[in-house]
Amino acid sequence: MKRILLIDVGNTNTDFALATPDRIGRVVTVPTRRLAGIAPAVAGYTGCIISSVVPAATRQLQRWLSLKPILVSTDVDLGIGVRYPKKKQIGADRLCNAVAVAQLYGAPAIVVDFGTAVTFDVVNADREYIGGVIAPGLAAMTHYLHEHTALLPHITPREPRSVIGKSTVGAMQVGTVVGYRGMVKEILGALQREPGMSKAVVVATGGYGELIARKVPAIQHVNPLLTLEGLRLIYLRNESH
């Protein structure tokens, strides 16, 4: 049976998953800074594909893997067009998201990926990636508050009980979660006012996708595996190349 090793290398975490041509199996997530020893432990795959935004980690993985991986970029067959002035600047994860949303949900579409940064990626009605938006990630905002103030603690973002914080942590939860939703709504609203995007399907993915999407009506779907689905689909288009 064909078993595809999918590897999505992010700035904070790296996801490993074994997939068949039809579905993704169990996902293992490890901190990117601790990749040593993980890849050699993965066995039984017949092909491999990597999406990476960390060049040093990509080189490390290429040394470890027993098979030459496909590296996601605009140089491979994506199955969608790319209408973007500087194609080499597009993150591989953003390409995966664009491929997956077009294939699984249709176009036009917007993907909101809640990672170390939050990215908004736009696919037009002609199934072309045309650009997007990059903003600070939710965790980055909370880390900044903790590291640059004397008395504010480090928090894990979660739904606040009230929009009036009754403690320092409660007030920070409101500012991060409710405030962050406000930023997401504003950016999505602006994108949907662009020509041809008023009826775009909006899909969220990434670590805080479910939390933020709960009260953002414009987000119609949440798919935590969207980037990995893009990897699977790109592999299937390029496996014989």
Image (tube, rainbow, N blue to C red):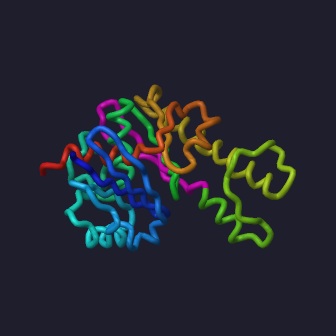
The quarter holding residue 107 reads top left
| Relative image position of residue 100 (x, y in whole percent) | 35, 40
| Relative image position of residue 127 (x, y in whole percent) | 30, 35
Question: Residue at 29% of width from left, 32% of height from top?
Answer: 126
Question: Residue at 70% of width from left, 71% of height from top?
Answer: 148
- The answer to whether any part of residue 90 appears in the image is no
Magenta span contains residue 121: yes
User: Which residue is nearer to you in this view: 114 or 31?
Assistant: 31
- The answer to whether any part of residue 3 appears in the image is yes
Classify 228 as above or below 103: below
> Majority secondary structure of the magenta segment?
strand
Quadrant holding the N terminus = top left
| Relative image position of residue 189 (x, y in whole percent) | 55, 35
**In the image, is 73 to the left or to the right of 187?**
left
| Relative image position of residue 157 (x, y in whole percent) | 67, 53
Question: Residue at 70% of width from left, 60% of height from top?
Answer: 155
Question: Residue at 25% of width from left, 52% of height from top?
Answer: 74
In this view, the residue farthest toward the top is 199
Magenta span contains residue 241: no
- The segment highlighted magenta reads 119-138
**In the image, is 209 to the left or to the right of 25?**
right
